Image: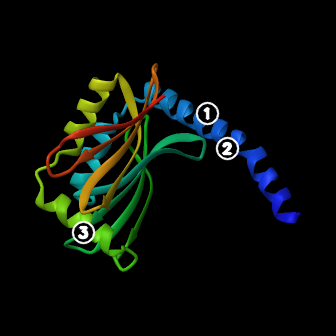
Amino acid sequence: MKCTKLICIALAFTPLAAFADKEDDALATLALQRANFSLEQAVDKVTTDYAKHIVEFEIDDHNNQATYEIEAVNLKAEEKHKIELSLTDGAVLKHKTKNSLSRLDDEDLLALQELQASSFNLSTTIAQLKQKYAADVIEFELENKKGITFYKFKLMGEQGLTRVIVDVTTGKVIPVMKR
């Protein structure tokens, strides 16, 4: 009986969680539309100043200011960086460095090694996705599954939410979902 009640409660909150996610996606899109510092500029800054490989990105906020929250890894120095850049001017609002990659699992390390060996250009890919889907990139993450290293992108535009994966070896874009 208690399990049934818990399931009912969980199901009752599912639409609220889905609405909150959609609202967050819409707010991220609005923040990007107001940005003076583009995502491509943020990617270039992080890959030049901190670490060559960006593994995760999302729009966040820091002290009531919209930020690019970026996680990047420097394999040579064995450093992981978490950086928050202002959408207004690209200023670094927060930066943490961990001097160890011990928390990365084998799939994460393999993904980074394959990304490093490829000629994949993240800034170019972002620009191409924005143009192709007439949408803003609001999240992405590097992953390795089934022996394939890819970026999983989440885009939001007037046509709604689109998810695609991009193979880092071939650059091939595969749509996963559009709503």
Q: Residue furthest right?
A: 1
Disc 2 residue type (three-letter): Ala
Vertical position of residue 159 compared to residue 65: above or below: above
- Assign the N terminus to one quadrant of the image: bottom right
As measured in the structure, the alpha-carbon distance from the residue carrying label 1 to the one carrying label 2 is: 10 Å
Give the image location of residue 42, x and y in percent: 32, 43
Task: State the residue in front, 12 or 83.
Answer: 12
Task: State the residue in front, 90 or 22.
Answer: 22
Q: Quadrant of residue 82?
A: bottom left
Q: Which residue is mark 1?
A: 23
Disc 1 residue type (three-letter): Glu
Point out the tag, 1 or 2, that comes first from the N-terminus.
Answer: 2
Label 3: how many Cα within 10 Å (few below 14, some 14–19, many 20+): some
- Residue at the image point whose x is 55% and y is 40% from the top: 65
Give the secondary structure at mark 3: helix
Vertical position of residue 136 compared to residue 149: above or below: above
As measured in the structure, the alpha-carbon distance from the residue carrying label 1 to the one carrying label 3 is: 34 Å
Q: Is residue 48 left or right of residue 134?
A: left
As measured in the structure, the alpha-carbon distance from the residue carrying label 3 to the one carrying label 2 is: 33 Å
Q: Which residue is mark 3?
A: 110
Vertical position of residue 155 compared to residue 33: above or below: below
Q: Which residue is mark 2?
A: 17
Point out the tag, 3 or 2, that comes first from the N-terminus.
Answer: 2
| Colour treatment of the image | rainbow
Point out the tag, 1 or 3, that comes first from the N-terminus.
Answer: 1
Label 2: how many Cα within 10 Å (few below 14, some 14–19, many 20+): few
Give the secondary structure at mark 2: helix
Give the image location of residue 97, x and y in percent: 38, 68
- Residue at the image point whose x is 32% and y is 67% from the top: 108
- Residue at the image point whose x is 46% and y is 19% from the top: 158
- Residue at the image point whose x is 36% and y is 34% from the top: 37
Give the secondary structure at mark 1: helix
